[in-house]
């Protein structure tokens, strides 16, 4: 049953990726330079090769409405958006937002699903400082870039560390 669920998740992910291939949005930053950002109407999707990947890996930042069900209860995490990456048959979904009972604490919920074995893991990482809800801007080479009302920074998916 878990393998069947993983196949359904993989199918939904492929549909979302196909739907978003043509969608990109650019936004000017405060210093006038351009940066790619996720929006609620046009998800960002960029192909990328990683050294440990055996194939081209699809990376995407999506609105919640495009991301499917949230694996964390609403009384734990109040999410803003989601990013997904598939590397070596492991689908990693990253939900960014804040802790529901402490909205000043930013949080990431990271769900990893092995699409071959069906094995899953879920971890929640809280910001060490009260910076507000996180919003994912980009994901590149296992580095997640985010913004929050009181800070901007990164999260390293390999070391599970925030940098501000």
Image: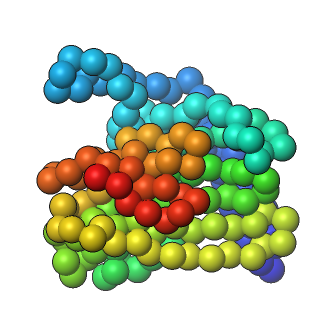
Q: Position of residue 85 (x, y in %)?
A: 62, 49
Residue 50, percent from left and from top: 70, 40
Q: Quadrant of residue 48?
A: top right
Residue 56 seen in the figure = yes
The colour mode here is rainbow
Q: Position of residue 14 (x, y in %)?
A: 70, 45
Q: Residue at x 77, y 45 (%)?
A: 53
Q: Nearer the viewer, residue 158 or 81?
A: 158
Q: Quadrant of residue 76?
A: bottom left
Q: Is residue 81 visible?
A: no
**59 left or right of 153?**
right
**Can you tell which quarter of the image residue 73 is in?**
bottom left
Disc tally is: 0
Report whether 74 appears left or right of 6: left
Q: Which residue is drawn at the image coordinates 16% and 52% (left, top)?
A: 149
Q: Residue at x 57, y 68 (%)?
A: 111
Left or right: 122 with respect to 55? Answer: left
């Amino acid at each position: 049953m878990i393998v069947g669920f993983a196949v359904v998740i993989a199918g939904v992910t492929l549909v979302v990726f196909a739907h978003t291939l043509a969608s990109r949005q650019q936004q000017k930053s405060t210093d006038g330079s351009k940066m790619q950002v996720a929006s609620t109407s046009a998800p960002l999707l960029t192909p990328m090769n990683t050294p440990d990947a055996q194939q081209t890996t699809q990376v995407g930042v999506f609105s919640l409405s495009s991301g499917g069900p949230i694996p964390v209860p609403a009384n734990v995490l109040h999410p803003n958006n989601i990013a997904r990456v598939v590397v070596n048959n492991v689908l990693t979904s990253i939900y960014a937002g804040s802790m529901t009972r402490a909205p000043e604490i930013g949080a990431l919920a990271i769900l990893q699903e092995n699409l071959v074995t069906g094995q899953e893991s879920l971890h929640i990482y809280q910001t060490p400082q009260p910076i507000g809800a996180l919003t994912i801007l980009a994901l590149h080479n296992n580095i997640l870039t985010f913004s929050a009302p009181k800070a901007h920074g990164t999260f390293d998916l390999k070391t599970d560390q925030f940098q501000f």
